[in-house]
Image: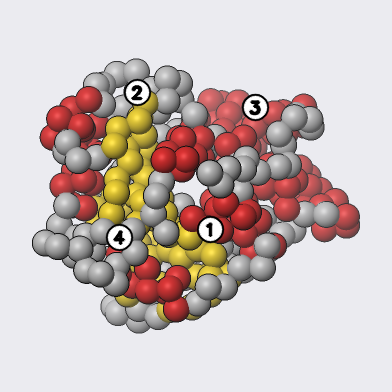
């Protein structure tokens, strides 16, 4: 198909880590979309156990970038940004498959309101057909550093095809204007995994933009393929990211209450829960994350890496 003249270029970034077959499944799905004015970047985060070259062999039109080391979610995505020529950038997990018409509603949302800084689609679980993972977020409670996804775990009966502001963005799939990224900065790669999209959304909102949910766009998510469900690895980075998010996005008494809540309410409760399940590996992962936050106070803890406007 030819590109429609009213379709602005969208740069698509997905990160691969030891999941080249999964990435190929994503690209096969993506090849069927009705929005044709795209350029695609696959960033390989130095996969140790598979050969990402197979991705380029099967899909020669994509741009394959190799990091040389594992930079995590934010760092991997950031690698591709200097090469992006699109008016908008789509950050999307490699463990997803997309509906053919999913991109048009996302682009139209941003085109209709220049005050919207980022937008995410409705997301269902791939392996649980019709079950919602994300349909917009509630507002963050900055004391508990928690928020909730509307419709989470429920059957999608069509009531979530609305378009509205969201309490945060969903990192599985998010469309962001390149101009916003140049103005605000890129995702903070100090997170490595988890909470970096919430931190980024908080910075973008602070810059005066709105965060949106677009329910007419649908993406299917094969969750936790790379990290493993409830693995010590995932627990470590989730906990580390949650505390770091609180440190970076609260101030004054709010920060005091948030950290008191995490360290003196959440931490004992979660530790006891893991001990009752005899999961000493989970206890170790959780406390390792706590210790990281207690011992890291300098360096690039609070800034955002900047994308130069060439």
- List the residue tagged with mark 3: 288
| Front of the two marks 4 and 1 | 1
Q: What coloring was used for the rendering?
A: secondary structure
Using the rendered image of the protein, determine whether residue 239 is visible from the camera's viewpoint: no
- CA distance separating discs 3 and 4: 34 Å
Residue 224 in which image quadrant:
top left
Q: Secondary structure at mark 2?
A: loop
Q: Secondary structure at mark 4?
A: strand
Residue 304 in which image quadrant:
top right
**Which quadrant: the N terminus?**
bottom left
Q: Which mark is residue 219?
A: 4
**Front-lying residue, 199 or 179:** 179
Q: Please state the horizontal and vertical placement of residue 161, each as a whole percent of the image.
A: 35, 78
Q: Earlier in the sequence, mark 2 or mark 1?
A: 2
Q: Earlier in the sequence, mark 3 or mark 1?
A: 1
**Front-lying residue, 115 or 45:** 115
- CA distance separating discs 3 and 1: 37 Å
Query: At 15% across and 30% down in the image, what residue appears?
Result: 57
| Front of the two marks 3 and 4 | 4
- CA distance separating discs 2 and 3: 25 Å
- List the residue tagged with mark 1: 179
- All told, the count of numbered labels is 4
Pick out the residue farthest to the right: 253
Query: At 88% across and 55% down in the image, what residue appears?
Result: 252
Query: At 42% across and 25% down in the image, what residue appears?
Result: 67
- List the residue tagged with mark 2: 47
Q: Earlier in the sequence, mark 2 or mark 3?
A: 2
Query: At 36% across and 51% down in the image, what residue appears?
Result: 11
């Amino acid at each position: 198909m030819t590109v429609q003249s009213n379709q602005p270029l969208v740069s698509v970034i997905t990160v691969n880590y030891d999941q080249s077959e999964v990435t190929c499944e994503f690209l096969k799905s993506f090849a069927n979309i009705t929005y044709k004015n795209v350029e695609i970047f696959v960033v390989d985060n130095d996969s140790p156990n598979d050969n990402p070259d197979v991705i380029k062999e099967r899909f020669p039109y994509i741009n394959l970038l190799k990091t040389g080391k594992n930079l995590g979610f934010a760092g991997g995505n950031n690698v591709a940004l200097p090469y992006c020529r699109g008016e908008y950038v789509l950050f999307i997990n490699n463990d997803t498959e997309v509906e053919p018409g999913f991109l048009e509603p996302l682009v139209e949302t941003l085109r209709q309101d220049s005050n919207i800084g980022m937008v995410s689609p409705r997301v269902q679980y791939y392996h649980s057909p019709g079950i919602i993972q994300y349909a917009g977020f509630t507002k963050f409670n900055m004391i508990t550093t928690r928020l909730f996804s509307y419709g989470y775990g429920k059957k999608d009966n069509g009531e979530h095809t609305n378009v509205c502001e969201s309490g945060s963005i969903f990192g599985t799939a998010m469309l962001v204007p390149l101009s916003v990224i140049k103005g605000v900065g890129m995702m903070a790669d100090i997170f490595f995994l988890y909470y970096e999209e919430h931190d980024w959304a908080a910075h973008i909102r602070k810059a005066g933009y709105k965060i949106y949910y677009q329910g007419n766009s649908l993406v299917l998510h094969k969750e936790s393929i790379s990290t493993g469900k409830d693995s010590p690895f995932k627990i470590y980075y989730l906990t580390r990211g949650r505390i770091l998010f609180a440190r970076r996005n609260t101030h004054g008494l709010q920060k005091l209450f948030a950290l008191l809540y995490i360290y003196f309410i959440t931490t004992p409760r979660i530790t006891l829960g893991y001990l009752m399940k005899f999961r000493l590996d989970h206890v170790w992962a959780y406390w390792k994350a706590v210790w990281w936050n207690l011992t890291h106070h300098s360096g690039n803890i609070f800034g955002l890496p900047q994308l130069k406007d060439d």
